[in-house]
Image (tube, rainbow, N blue to C red):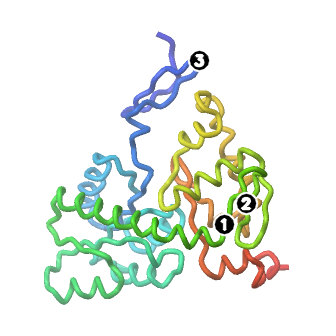
Amino acid sequence: MQSCGILVPGITYIRRGPRWALGPERIAMSLEIIQIIDDDPMQVRLLDGLLRKARYRTNVANDGLTGLEDIKRLRPSLVLIDCMMPGMDGLEVVRRLREDPDTKALPIIMITGLSSVDHQAAGLENGADDYITKPVHGPEVLARVRAMLRRTQSWARVEKSQISEGLRVIEEHYTVEFFGRRLMLDKSEFKVLKRLVKQFGRAVSHEELGEILWGQDASIHLERLEPLVQSLREKVEEDSAEPTLLVSLPGGFRFVPPSKEAADRLAGTVPRLRERAS
């Protein structure tokens, strides 16, 4: 049997022509990231193991400040946060997330050992969407996570009409009207942007984009995908070095619609960031 180099335990590899590729077990992993913020090691292990077994990707922070930094960097689809933590507690983290335009709609489930109605009401009033009381039970956690993600995807479908007001695709010329600016794209850039916007509200995997661009030869060309997306960012982003519209995720990308202020800047109704800095 021919070696395929270093094999990572827990990942299935399959032979595809002259190359090795990730097998179905890895591809089946959801691209949705769930951020866990909790200082209790036992509860973290329980939640992390439960969610990974259900094929969700997870990221763990053991304090509120690190959790906020992780959320800004990773753009998770949902946050599970403990209410009582030393330093910045869960209520303060939720309050800050709701004050930030980039995270004000982020789904948040609060976990609390305080079962009184007043404590639960405080979490909801600060911006949590749901709560789970300790001790946590696996089936309840998964049911609430899945219900919250379904609800978020439903909201995303409604908001697509708002995006279409600022983005118009002119297929025959590989041209898009992007918030008041007409952009000429090459064929590959056009295909990537069209798919990301069409799937607004969810992550699109490297493999899915690769198949759109290169068909059955996708596994051979995937290393070309990141430079292609970066080229696209240089045309649509205010600052391609710090992208906010075409966001990288582990294993894929996601289109994040601009805030109203950013959309106004893109349309040229207010100065863009680069112009302000000059």
Amino acid type, mark 3: Pro
Upstream in sequence: badge 2 or badge 1: 1
Q: Identify the residue at image location x=72%, y=79%.
A: 265
C-alpha distance separating marks 3 and 1: 41 Å
Q: Do the CB atoms of the residues marked 3 and 2 lie less than 8 Å apart?
A: no
Q: Quick check: 229 above or below 144?
A: above
Q: Position of residue 133 (x, y in %)?
A: 17, 72
- Counting from the top left corner in percent of width and height, residue 109 is at 30, 71
Is residue 84 or residue 210 the one in the foreground? 210
Quarter of the figure that contains the C terminus:
bottom right
Q: Secondary structure at mark 3?
A: loop
> What is the spatial separation of the Cα atoms under label 2 and label 1, in whole angstroms?
7 Å
Residue at 57% over, 22% down: 19
Judging by the rendered image, the residue that carries numbered circle 3 is 18
Nearer to us of marks 3 and 1 is 1
- 10 Å neighbourhood of mark 2: few (<14), some, or many (≥20)? many
> Do labels 3 and 1 touch, CB within 8 Å?
no
Q: Quadrant of residue 110?
A: bottom left
- Residue occupying image coordinates x 18% and y 56%: 138
Task: Say whether disc 3 or disc 1 marks the residue closer to the N-terminus.
Answer: 3
Q: Which residue is mark 2?
A: 176
Q: Residue at x 28, y 63 (%)?
A: 147
- In the rendered structure, are the residues bearing label 2 and label 1 in contact, judged by CB atoms less than 8 Å apart? yes
Q: Quadrant of residue 188?
A: top right
Counting residues from the start of the chain, the first of labels 3 and 2 encountered is: 3
Where disc 2 sits, the SS reads strand
Tag 1's secondary structure? strand
Q: How many marks?
A: 3
Dot 1 corresponds to which residue?
167
The percent coordinates of residue 191 (x first, y second) are 66, 47
Q: Position of residue 268 (x, y in %)?
A: 77, 79
Mark 3 or 2: in front is: 2
